[in-house]
Each structure stands twice: as structure tokens, then as C-alpha cells.
Image (cartoon, rainbow, N blue to C red):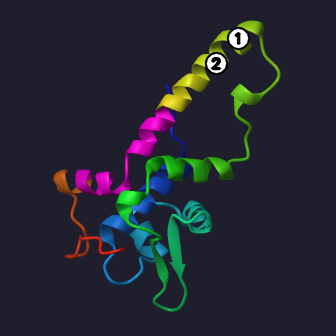
Amino acid sequence: MLRISKKLMFAIEAVLDIAYNAGTEPVQSGEITRRQGIPKRYLEQVLQQLVRDGILAGVRGPRGGYRLARERRRITLGEIVKVVRSMETATDPIEEPAGSILGHKVVRPLWAELQEECMKKLEDVTIEDLCLRARSAGVESETEDRIDFTI
């Protein structure tokens, strides 16, 4: 039914990786690629956009990388979805003028309602929630310090 794009999946996995594995040093993109298997061509583009939109903070220098721009309990999946959707170049079929009367009067409004409900749910799920799921699923973190001290 509703499908998640590779770019969106990789963006969520990258932010979660940074939140779950970050210690005192920023997380480098190569570490994310190694742990998650995300191709660099997707990763760098997505990470830069997440920095521009205030979800991540980029740290320059030889020990640079990425950190969360704010507490993981304040970053939602909905925000990440909006960032990735803004990057996509394809038009949403719902917004195209062509189509049948049934499509315009019945199918598209229904699909828009479903998308709105889905986005509301995604706005309720935080990166903190995903970190807790990872911990309860037994996923090991590469850092001993999993507590988020960001204020």
C-alpha cells in the first residue's frame, strides 16, 4: 500500500544511528555507512539537507561529523518525512490536474485524508521512541553512554 522511498528509509536510519550511537564525538558519515549499509550517494545528500532543515548539526574538521541539532525527544519522524519529501523532484499524482472525475472527487480526497492521518501519526513518533525500541529489541549501541544530555 503506502510505500516508503529508499531515501526516506535511509534518512530515518541515519538520524536514528546518530541518536543511538553518538557519544561525545560527532558521528561521521562513514560510520553510518559501515553500520547501516547506506550507500554514500544517498547518505551525504540527505545528511546535508537534514542539517539545512535543523534536524542535524554538522561539525567541521578532521574529527567532524554530525550530531542531533536538538534532543532526540524533540525530533519527530514527521519532520524527517517533510525534509525528504521536499528533496523529491517527482510530482505527487494527487496534485496532477489530469485524471477522471472519480479520481478527483473520490480517490484523491480519500488518499489525501490517509496521508494526513499518517503524517499525524509520524508527528507523534520521536527519535527517542525509536531509540527505546532499538534498546528493547536488543540492538547494541557502539557507545556506552546512551543518555542524551542535550539541553
**Mark 2 and mark 1: Cα distance apart in space:** 7 Å
**Residue at image location 45% in from the left, 77% down from the top:** 28
Q: Which residue lies furthest to the right in this view?
A: 97
Residue, disc 2? 109
Q: What residue type is labelled 2?
A: Pro
Residue situated in front as seen by the camera: 134 or 114: 114
Relative side of 105 to 143, left or right: right
**Which amino acid is tagged 1?**
Lys
Quarter containing the C terminus: bottom left
Magenta region, main secondary structure: helix
Q: Which residue is drawn at 24% across and 68% down?
A: 141
Name the residue furthest front.
151
**Residue 64 x %, y %:** 49, 85
Q: Name the residue under label 1.
A: 105
User: In the figure, is residue 142 to the left or right of 138?
Assistant: right
Q: Quadrant of residue 108?
A: top right
Segment tinted magenta in the rendering: 118-133
- Is residue 124 located in the magenta-colored stretch of the structure? yes
Count of marks overlaid on the render:
2
Q: Disc 2 vs disc 1: Cβ atoms closer than 8 Å?
A: yes
- Seen from the viewer's position, the closer of residues 142 and 49 is 49
Q: Position of residue 25 (x, y in %)?
A: 37, 84
Say what secondary structure mark 1 lies in: helix
Residue at 48% from the left image edge and 29% from the top image edge: 117
SS under mark 2:
helix
Q: Would residue 35 be seen by someone viewing this image from the given angle?
A: no
Vertical order, 151 against 119 (above or below): below
- Residue 101 in view (yes/no): yes
